[in-house]
Image (cartoon, rainbow, N blue to C red):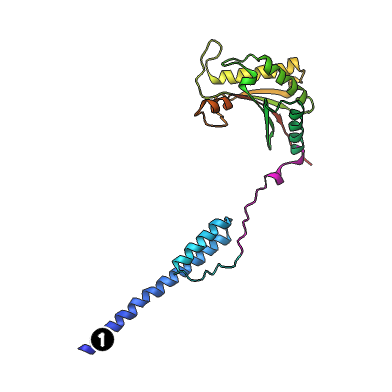
Amino acid sequence: MARRRKKKETQNNSGGSGWMTTFSDLMSLLLTFFILLYSMSSVSAEKFEAAAQSMQLAFGGGESMLEGSTVVNTTTDTTEETVDPELLKMYNEVVQFLETKNITSQASVEYDQDGIYVNIQESILFGSGSAIIADSGKNTLNNLGELIQQFDNEVVIEGYTDNVPMHNANFSSNWELSTSRALSVLRYLSEERKVDPTRLSAKGYGEYHPTVSNDSEENKAKNRRVNIVIVYDQQEE
């Protein structure tokens, strides 16, 4: 009887080590799957190293099979590479013009594949709730009219507001206020600065395209603006 019990205990020990073999095979398959996913994707070196260390710890802290390998981050910023050189040239010319006229504090410049955006804050152009161009705004628009005349591109005037509801004797909503402001700038450029009206168009976006959240008076002031967009049409070669 004692010998039979000893044999049974031996069999139980053998079965106990069997699950370790299965677990080891499972871990090997998971590691293989992990490496396969890595080979098919782009990851950062930091994240990959962290994952490799986690896998190493899971296997008992032994030497990592990934140690000594080189991780290449294939995610690159191609923005500068894909921007048309002519667009960059236009942008630099606009920036240089604003600096020469010393109006960089009155207007900021950005660009994307659609064109150059000259951003003018409401406080420069208009009084609160008004679409009548102030004297300070006229001086700025005189300079920007000269800038626009240096190009043949179409120009879009975009009006924006904050999210404070608008309702006065002249405007019943921010839609109307933003559109009226854009039209006022358009008319000034056409009638006073003699910009070809066939090049000009106006849009009013109201409160629905803020650049920042309307959670403070400072941010609301940033959202009340007029953009003069010098449209860029990439010429086909």
Q: Is residue 30 visible?
A: no
Height in image: 121 above or below 111?
Answer: above
Magenta residue check for 199? no
Judging depth in this view, the residue of 118 and 200 nearest the camera is 118
Say which quadrant the N terminus sits in. bottom left
Where in the figure is residue 46, as x and y percent of width and height?
55, 56
Where in the figure is residue 146, as x and y percent of width and height?
77, 23
Height in image: 215 above or below 8?
Answer: above
Q: What span is in magenta?
A: 70-86
Q: Which residue is mark 1?
A: 6
- Picture quadrant where residue 144 is located: top right
Residue drawn 68% across the image and 14% down it: 135
Residue drawn 70% across the image and 44% down it: 80
Height in image: 23 above or below 216?
Answer: below
Three-letter amino acid code at disc 1? Lys
- Residue density around tag 1, few if under 14, some if 14–19, many if 20 or more, within 10 Å: few
Residue drawn 61% across the image and 64% down it: 70
Majority secondary structure of the magenta segment? Answer: loop
